[in-house]
Image (tube, rainbow, N blue to C red):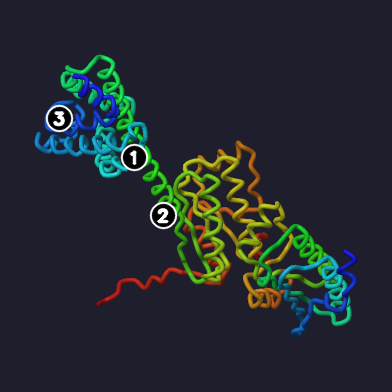
């Protein structure tokens, strides 16, 4: 069949693969539904897995038609990106490492390849090998897209949570007229202490606060870096005309500070937030006294 | 330097007298010439009028460098020698952070949130505390 052969050489391997994928869409989807990746992600029904498989086969065929089998950014992948990410995330949640997910994705190739080889039985071996190579490149790209999407989703999640943590972890509380407090929770790093310093100083301006209390009850450890950050914040608040009190120093932290030889001499410290508040109120001239005991009261 | 000295007339920072207190408001950036002129004006006014306090309002200063920091500290020290107290009022958060990052914490400098608080501070007896100090007896 010289005509047929001439015709076949004109169609590129990628297009050939695309045609094959469309032709065998149903079989591939059925076979994939039996693979561990689909079986474990779509546990509700087999039909669901087959549907998902069909969508992915369509996307692959579209990419192959566009001759962009090596391009993870190919337009065909955009539609299935979300689904791939969901599948990858589901496997990660099940406790699989990235490598394991990747090898599960790789396991999708053999069934399709077998089909392809069986399909192109009539073709000459050279052509068959070309098509098989194109198919495995395409599947490799699918794998790349899935991993890429999963990783970027994770990264976005981490970024979002880091921002949330920064916002959540630094509330400035007004305790009294002219007294603000920041309860610090969690480890203090440079970025966080910068945010703490800025929010505290802005609160000092907004609330006309003469006193600012930094409560470090929730800070697990104090090293020289954290102490340095604290002292910077205290010094900045003092330059603005507010007095800073550091409270919530637990016994263990007091010991650490002394062992490290850190000099917090310029910083006013109190054991608890209540002590710090009492000190500030006293300085403001507002004393809280207990109501006088009047004995039994008849009602 | 010479260009600042070339226009001494425009380089004056006004020094206002309010009762026993002198009020100086700094705005924008302070040139070398203006700074030394201000220190001289302040010293002469304090000696002439026997005021007990100086308030330097820097709420209009948005950018600070080590030079301005040193001018503030020097002015305060010089005023102290003439038996008057200096209070720096209204420092912006960004300015405070910059000074601290530069390592300039001025432990001897009196500070107040705003001019009002500074005047209230100066109205108190001399033993009155200052932020960061050891507190009232």
Q: Chain of mark 2?
A: A
Residues at discs 3 and 2 in contact (Cβ within 8 Å): no
Left/right of residue A180 with respect to residue A238 in the rendered view: left
- Along the polypeptide, which appears first: circle 3 or circle 2? 3
Residue B122 is situated, as x and y percent measured from the top left of the image, at 71, 75
- The secondary element bearing badge 3 is classed as loop
Find residue A58 and report its image quarter.
Answer: top left
Q: Where B91 falls versus A18 (above or below)?
A: below
Res. B137 visible in picture: no
Left/right of residue B68 with respect to residue A181 in the rendered view: right
- Along the polypeptide, which appears first: circle 1 or circle 2? 1
Residue beneath disc 1? A74
- The secondary element bearing badge 2 is classed as helix
Q: Are marks 3 and 2 on the same chain?
A: yes
Q: CA distance from mark 3 to mark 2?
A: 53 Å
Q: CA distance from mark 1 to mark 3?
A: 22 Å
Find residue B110 and report its image quarter.
Answer: bottom right
Find residue A282 and report its image quarter.
Answer: bottom right
Q: Where A125 falls versus A73 (above or below)?
A: above
For label 1, the crowd category at 10 Å Cα-Cα, with few meaning under 14, some 14 to 19 and many 20 or more, is some
Residue B37 is situated, as x and y percent measured from the top left of the image, at 86, 72
For label 2, the crowd category at 10 Å Cα-Cα, with few meaning under 14, some 14 to 19 and many 20 or more, is few
Residue beneath disc 2? A168
- Along the polypeptide, which appears first: circle 1 or circle 3? 3
Query: Which label sits in the foreground, 1 or 2?
Result: 1
Q: A100 and A75: which one is in front?
A: A75
Residue beneath disc 3? A24
Left/right of residue B83 with respect to residue A255 in the rendered view: right
């Amino acid at each position: 069949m010289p005509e047929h052969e001439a015709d076949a050489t004109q169609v590129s391997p990628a297009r050939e693969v695309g045609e094959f994928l469309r032709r065998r869409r149903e079989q591939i989807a059925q076979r994939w539904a039996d693979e561990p990746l689909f079986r474990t992600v779509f546990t509700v029904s087999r039909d669901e897995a087959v549907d998902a498989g069909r969508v992915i086969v369509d996307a692959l065929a579209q990419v192959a038609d566009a001759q962009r089998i090596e391009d993870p950014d190919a337009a065909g992948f955009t539609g299935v990106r979300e689904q791939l990410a969901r599948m990858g995330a589901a496997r990660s949640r099940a406790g699989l490492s990235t490598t394991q997910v990747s090898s599960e994705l790789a396991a999708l190739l053999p069934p399709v390849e077998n089909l392809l080889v069986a399909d192109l039985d009539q073709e000459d071996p050279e052509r068959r090998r070309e098509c098989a190579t194109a198919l495995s490149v395409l599947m490799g790209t699918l794998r790349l897209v899935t991993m890429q999407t999963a990783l970027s989703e994770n990264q976005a999640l981490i970024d979002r949570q880091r921002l949330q943590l920064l916002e959540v972890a630094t509330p400035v509380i007004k305790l009294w007229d002219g007294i603000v407090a920041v309860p610090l929770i969690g480890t203090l790093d440079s970025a966080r202490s910068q945010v703490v310093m800025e929010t505290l100083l802005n609160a000092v301006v907004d609330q006309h606060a003469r006193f600012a209390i930094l409560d470090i009850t929730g800070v697990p450890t104090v090293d020289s870096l954290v102490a340095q950050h604290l002292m910077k914040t205290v010094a900045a608040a003092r330059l603005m005309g507010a007095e800073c009190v550091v409270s919530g120093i637990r016994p263990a932290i007091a010991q650490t500070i002394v062992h490290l030889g850190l000099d917090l001499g310029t910083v006013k410290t109190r054991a608890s937030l209540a002590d710090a508040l009492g000190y500030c109120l006293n300085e403001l001239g507002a004393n809280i006294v207990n109501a006088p005991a009047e004995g039994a009261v008849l009602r | 330097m010479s260009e600042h000295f070339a226009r001494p007339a425009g380089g004056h920072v006004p020094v206002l007298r309010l009762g026993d207190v002198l009020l100086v408001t700094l705005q924008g950036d302070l040139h070398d010439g203006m700074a030394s002129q201000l220190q001289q004006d302040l010293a002469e006014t304090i000696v002439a009028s026997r005021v007990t306090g100086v308030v330097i309002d820097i709420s209009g200063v948005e950018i600070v460098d080590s030079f301005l920091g040193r001018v503030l500290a020097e002015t305060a020290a010089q005023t102290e020698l003439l038996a008057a107290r200096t209070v720096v009022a209204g420092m912006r958060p960004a300015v405070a952070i910059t000074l601290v990052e530069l390592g300039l914490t001025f432990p001897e400098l009196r500070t107040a949130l705003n001019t009002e608080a500074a005047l209230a501070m100066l109205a108190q007896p001399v033993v009155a505390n200052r932020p960061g100090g050891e507190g009232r007896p």
